[in-house]
Amino acid sequence: MPASTPPQPHPLAAAARVIMLALVAVLTLFATHDPGQLWWIALLAVAGLPALLAPEHRLVGPLSRVAEVLVLGLAASQVAAVATVGGESVLGLGASAVLPYLAVPVTVTTLRRRFHECGALLVVAAATLLVAGALTEVDGGRQLAQAGYLVVCAQWLILAGLGLAAATGLHRVIQVRNEGKPQPYAEATRLLTQLRTVARQLPGATLDPGGISEHLLEELRTVARADRAAVLSASGGGRLVVLAQVGVERVDWETTLDADSAIADAWASQQPHTAARSQARSHRGGDVSALIVPLVAGVRTVGLVVLEADAAQAYPPGVVSRVTGLTRPAALRLEAALLFDEVRSLATNEERQRLAREIHDGVAQELVMVGYGIDNALAYVDEDPQETAEALRTLRGEVTRVITELRLSLFELRSEVDRHGGLAAAIAEYARTVGASGGLRVHLSLDESTARLPAATEAELLRIAQEAVTNARKHAGASNLWVTCEVDPPYAQIEVSDDGQGIADQRSDGHYGLAIMAERAERIRGRLEIRPRQPSGTTVAVVLGSSPRRDSVRGNAAAVEGE
């Protein structure tokens, strides 16, 4: 393994140090008129060289910056001691000539987000300036006692401290913004993981909007009188739907949000409302008190609670306060249940649509034909009893066949890839069951490694195999069915062949099944292949990934042996 190369000094960092050293050198000459004081500048350059060459080193970088600050403090004291203007000593001028270099180590550490190190460097600089000032004599007194020296040192230390504070605050603001900014895939993973955990751990009714609403009404009736009560939720189109209600009789609540009602006002204002009239479209009269409390989660109104009592002034402020104390946490629970219900609906919508089309094109059509047969039998029951009896026997056979179709559809829905059995076992079980019901001889060739495909991929491959087997049983008129399953992740190949009439002669709903298989294959980035089988029949295959050479040879051998 090649050795890692150490990080190279950044050209801008080197240029900044050189420029700052040159500036300090010019200011030192201007303040002291003594070229001999430039040796402090050379010493600063030597002290900062390791930090420039190895800025990320755990020891070299920090120690070099500490050395820079020590040399800087001593240089500021000594240059201040010899600085003169017009022959008179000016301590502040000398210190201000050197201290601008303090910006170098402070800037380097803040840019690298080493804020604690930067604070420590400022402490070291202050201590060095104080100690050097206490030990240096100027004009018969200690340098530390001179106001000009102290003012200039304090000025530069305060400026450096303010820069450190500003950099620290800016870093925290940026960090908070970055943490608050969701990353799409990371956020989706986190939310779906939480959703899976909640769905597995919570009781069944906990994420049911109706169950949560009923439980809320039961709680509210313990703190407030409610002869009639309901929980309403938005359904789109400016209307509300009743999730749950309690009371002696069923109430036809006002559910239009654009109506002149307390319900509409509470929804719009997100504040509890009381009224002296019923919120139902029809009421027999008498004293009525109504309380409408919006269920607000964050800034979104997710529903309303409506309480009614057959009495005047039944909901004083104290009762309203107790009711809202229960509805606040319930709003979040109801929102979670509604969101979970929506996610569940989206997740199952595609499968529901497929089942609806399959039932409409399959069982429903068969039942229509059975109905026509019954009508015909009834028309000839008096004229030809023998023919009617024969028609009824035929209808009985059709009913038996439809029942078989329904049972197979239910079996298909219940079939899934077992965690321990694997994809091949699930396909084999389905093929045997369908073959036995349809009078097909099933020939299986299964070759599955111990490694597993992702669960979602296995589920899609199982559905494709089921659809292919079902098409062969329903539309091909076949006597034999060959099912080959090869799985060696990330490669997989499922092949279903029959000796029926061929794809060109099948019914249109069989072609619809092929479209479903193509969509499923595309979803898992697989390839669906449909080709004639010699001498008769059709082969439907789905291929996922690329097969290694050994698997390709082994798979071909298995296919030949099956044929």
Image: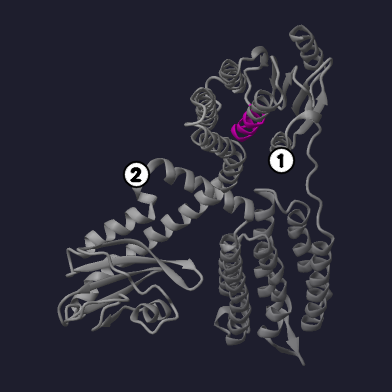
User: In the rendered image, is residue 254 in sight?
Assistant: yes
Predominant SS along the magenta part: helix
Rendering coords of residue 25 (x, y %): 81, 74
Compared across the picture, whether 469 is left or right of 303 comes to right
Q: Nearer the viewer, residue 287 or 37?
A: 287
Q: Amino acid at mark 1?
A: Glu
Q: Is residue 289 above or below residue 442?
A: below
Label 2 sits on residue: 203
Secondary-structure class at tag 1: helix
Viewer-side residue, 4 vs 294: 294
Q: Does the magenta portion include 479?
A: no
Q: Residue at x 37, y 58 (%)?
A: 333
Q: Is residue 460 magenta?
A: yes
Q: Depth check: 388 or 122 in front?
A: 388
Question: Would you identify the image quadrant in which residue 491 lies?
Answer: top right
What residue lies at 54% left-to-right and 19% top-to-bottom? 421
Residue displayed at 79% across by 66% down: 17
Of the 4 image quadrants, the one containing the N terminus is: top right
Report the span colored magenta.
453-465
Mark 2: few/some/many CA within 10 Å (<14, 14-19, 20+): few
Kindly report the distance in space between the C-alpha atoms of the residues bearing marks 2 and 1. Answer: 35 Å
Nearer-N-terminus badge (2/1): 2
In the drawing, what numbered circle is on residue 519?
1
